[in-house]
Amino acid sequence: MGWNKEVHDAARKQICKFWYFCNIPFIAARSPYWQGMVDSITICGAGFKAPTDAELSGPLFLQMVEDMKVELEDHRQSWSQKGCTIMTDGWTDRRNRTLLNFLVSCGGD
C-alpha cells in the first residue's frame, strides 16, 4: 500500500489516543527507541499483535534484562582498560522512601 494521507493521519491519531490515555510525557517522543519501535511495527505489517501486559511484565521483561546484561558486559570490559568513576545520588520522597541512583562514568563509552 502506497503513501496515503488519510491512512497516515488515522495512524497518527491512534498514536495520539494511546499517548494521551496513558499520560505519557511528550518528551518520550525524543527517546532513541521511539522511531525504531514504530519502524519495527511497520515492518511486521497489518495483523501485528502488540504484547500484552503479562508479556511486557513477564517473559519480555526478563528477555530485556538478559539483553541489557550482555550489553553492560561489553562496557564493563572497557572499564578495566579505560577506568571509570562510580557515582551515587539519593533522595527521600514524601513517604520517607529512599531512592538511590548509581551512575558509572567512563570515557569513550
Image (spheres, rainbow, N blue to C red):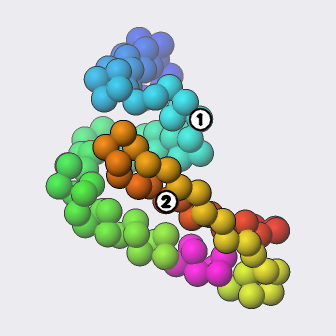
How far from the left and from the top, in percent, is residue 105? 72, 66
Q: Is residue 87 above or below residue 27?
A: below
Q: Place residue 19 in its image quadrant.
A: top left
Distance (Cα) linking label 1 and label 2: 25 Å
How far from the left and from the top, in percent, is residue 101? 53, 59
- Disc 1 to disc 2: CB gap under 8 Å: no
Q: What residue is shown with label 2?
A: 100
Q: Secondary structure at mark 2?
A: strand
Q: Is residue 82 above or below residue 48?
A: below
Q: Residue at coordinates 46% horizontally, 72% vertically from top-left?
A: 67
Residue 100 in the figure: left or right of residue 24: right
Q: What residue is shown with label 1?
A: 30
* N-terminal label among 1 and 2: 1
Q: Is residue 52 above or below residue 103?
A: above
Q: Nearer the viewer, mark 1 or mark 2?
A: 2
- Highlighted range, magenta: 70-76
Q: Amino acid at mark 1?
A: Arg
How far from the left and from the top, in percent, is residue 109? 75, 67
Which residue is at the front of the view, 76 or 58?
76
